[in-house]
Image (tube, rainbow, N blue to C red):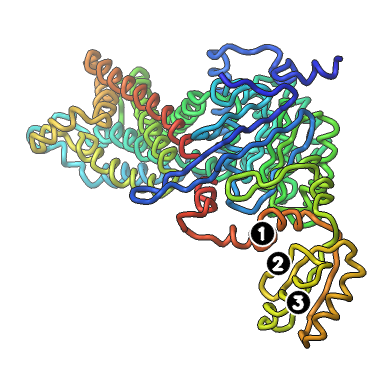
Amino acid sequence: MTATTATTPGSARSIPSRPSRAGTSFLRHTAVLTLRQLRAAVRVPAFVVMNLVQPLIWLLLFGQLFTSVVEIPGFTGGADYLEFLTPGIVVMMALFGSAWAGTSFIEDMNRGVMDRLLTSPTHRGALMVASLLYQAVLTFVQTLIVLGVAWLLGARFDGGIAGVLVLLAAAMLLTASFSALSNAAALLARDQNILIGLSQLITIPLMFLSSALMDTSLSADWVEDVAAFNPFEWAVVAGREALLSADPDWASVWAHLGYLAVFALVLGWLATRAFRSYQRSA
Amino acid sequence: MPIATPGLALEARDLVKRYPQGRRKPPVTALDGLSFGVEEGTVFGLLGPNGAGKSTTVKILATLSAADSGDAFVAGFDVRGRAADVRRSIGFVAQKQVSDPMDTGLENLVLAGQLHGMGTRDARSRAADLLDRFGLAAAARRQVKTYSGGMARKLDVAIGLMHRPSVLFLDEPTTGLDPEARAEMWAEIERMAADERTTVLLTTHYLEEADRLASRLAIVANGRVVTEGAPEELKAALRGDAIVLELLEAADVEGALALIERSTVFRDVVREGRTVRARTDEGAQSLPLALALLDAERIRVASATVARPSLDDVYLAHTGHSFSSAHRHGGATNATTDDPATSEERAA
């Protein structure tokens, strides 16, 4: 009779002996899936480097091109344009990089990897969060490189370590938000072209409706008004205030980081729901 | 609440699935009341051309997709209400590669084990066993993108087996493999089915694959099971041998068809292009008779063969057209509203 019991439906053989709680499986799945993506990035570092080329060119070019911007009457961003520009470039790099986050999902969908993961006990939230974490780690590394280059070019940051940490947090939260958006677009459209559209249609306007390159108090009033609701601007404001000021307005910094955190949570949650839509049409 | 039938590891009852085609177009019916059951520990084949509904069936049973109506049970669990239990019980080898080409074979296996709740040490030792058994031990630490098609497919099956599932789905495991790799894969699947005591649902559009691997099979056409049984039973039920006459002139086909049909020795006479097929009790004796009948009317024959019943004949008898022509048709279909091939290709 042992043979019959061994093949009883739902017997111990088919179920892991220690059924883990949903919470611990979420954390463990997030960890192993993030490591999977990091392994790939370490094997092909070209991808990480490629995303750095454009921001560094902008930093070098704009830093030289617009040095006299700071002399415009009414410019409130300090006395050195390179220093003013650096946090803007970091946040821009985070935004541009995260627009492509959905590429990994598209690759997994084009293969059978996504279907295999979705037919296993893999936590949907962990699939999403692992991707956001991985993108945030890339942003972390790239931010330190951009800051290093800016320092070599002569920029000095009065905010010190605390300022660098706030800029990192702001850039990583923005990365998580827009990576979630990119992943959701990937799950809904299953097409790499939609990500190209996303990066063209969303990132450029967000960047110019902000103070990343220019003090918005010198722009048309509506630009400043719109920028107040722009998550990209929240990251620029928090990062620049903390990085450049020896005595930052912490209330403003924390408020903007808070907006970003809420924005990332909401987008992350919505993007996780997109798995249902993907499966409905499977 | 519907209840699973005891003793069956897989069960589909009247599954219906329609894919919307967008506005003003009628939905495409991929499954149209499909039913079958698979006993525990057996290999069951779902055989049919592209677009017959095989992949849709697998996706519903594996909780990837949901049926519009009907019930499905896997390892005793309802796929609707107990999806989490189903997912713990199954291994899923999709039609497309399920491994990550950037990871090594070992990393792929360990990750699959970890996602199924195995400890890292357990996962590593199970992965080493599987790599050994599938002859991939030497390539364990190489990235999968360097693997040949046959090696990658074996790794896919190993990934599906990592957590010792009670049910394994193999969706067209040998499509795209060269004959040598296919033969090797067949041997692996046979060995695995014996060793692991796993119930396997194999979908294939290769008749010889179903014949060799499956202890029972269902032939699927247009979203329904048209016949089901052990391969030998299905062939035996046909009574007799098949004769196939290929004519030189297409214009002669009508005449030849009439001649053969008139004779009481032959039955199930059908035409297909320049070919006339029929069934007869003693093929070796009846073939000269058929040739004599045609020769008397000056109908020239390009080739004449006699064969023991094959699954192709089973397919022909149940669907009215031969498997290879159905397959060509299914594979080449474009966006017509009444063919489920389109929806399944889109969904794949």
Q: Amino acid at mark 3?
A: Leu
Residue denoted by label 1? B320
The residue shown at (57%, 17%) is A25
Q: Which percent across, then down, holds residue B201?
A: 71, 37
Decide if residue B103 is in sight here.
yes
In this view, the mark in front (3 or 1)? 3
Question: Residue B270 got which mark?
Answer: 2
Q: Which percent across, then down, holds residue B187?
A: 84, 44
The residue shown at (56%, 43%) is A44
Residue denoted by label 3? B259
Q: Earlier in the sequence, mark 2 or mark 1?
A: 2
The residue shown at (43%, 40%) is A186
Q: Give above or below for B345 relative to A95.
A: below
Could you classify mark 2 by the number of other residues whose Cα lies within 10 Å: few (under 14), some (14-19), or many (20 or more)?
some
Asked which secondary structure carries label 1, the reply is loop
Q: Which percent across, then down, holds residue A85?
A: 26, 36
Q: Earlier in the sequence, mark 3 or mark 1?
A: 3
Query: Foreground residue, A253 or A248?
Result: A253
Query: Foreground residue, A234 or B56?
Result: B56
Could you classify mark 3 by the number of other residues whose Cα lies within 10 Å: few (under 14), some (14-19), or many (20 or more)?
some
Q: Which residue is at the far right?
A: B285
Host chain of mark 1: B
Host chain of mark 2: B
Q: Give above or below for B274 relative to A15.
A: below
Can you say which quadrant of the picture contains the N terminus of chain B? top right
Q: Kindly check if marks 2 and 1 are in contact, taking CB atoms under 8 A apart as contact.
A: yes
Host chain of mark 3: B
Q: Earlier in the sequence, mark 2 or mark 3?
A: 3
Q: CA distance from mark 3 to mark 1?
A: 20 Å
